[in-house]
Amino acid sequence: MQFQDLLAYKKSFALAMKVFHISKSFPVEEKYSLTDQIRRSSRSVCANIAEAYRKRRYPKNFISKLTDSDAENSETQTWLEFAFKCEYINQRTFDELIIDT
């Protein structure tokens, strides 16, 4: 089994790709702020899951990486709230993405 086979990895990767495609439509003035932040945090979720999988033999390291992944997921939710409140995404898109986080 590889980390790419993990359901959590698959879901977080899919969400990161959705965020990437949706954030392409964000205003250009958000390129180095909201767009960059939301892409980084959403990608970091699956990256931390991959790292946790590699460290699964070391319980403290494993838990630490999963905790990091959870924190990045919360950060992604926060950036999605900003995107919604700034009217860069609509209610339906926001709700769909939040369900996936």
Image: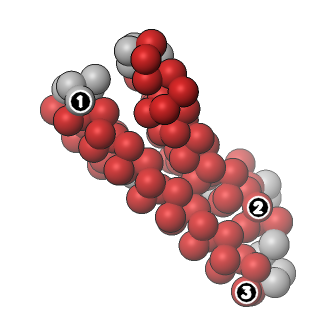
Residue 75 x %, y %: 44, 54
Q: Which mark is residue 51?
A: 2
Crowd rating for badge 2 (residues with CA inside 10 Å; few <14, some 14–19, many 20+): some
Residue 68 can be seen in this image: yes
Which quarter of the figure has residue 30? Answer: top left
In primary-sequence order, the first of circles 1 and 3 is 3
Residue 9 x %, y %: 61, 52
Three-letter residue code for mark 3: Lys
Where 56 sits versus 12, above or below?
below
The residue at the point 76 percent across, 79 percent down is 61
For the residues bearing labels 1 and 2, Cβ distance under 8 angstroms: no
In primary-sequence order, the first of circles 1 and 2 is 2
- Residue under label 3, please give it: 60
Label 2: state its secondary structure.
helix
Q: 30 or 57: nearer the eye?
A: 30
For the residues bearing labels 2 and 3, Cβ distance under 8 angstroms: no
Q: Which mark is residue 86?
A: 1
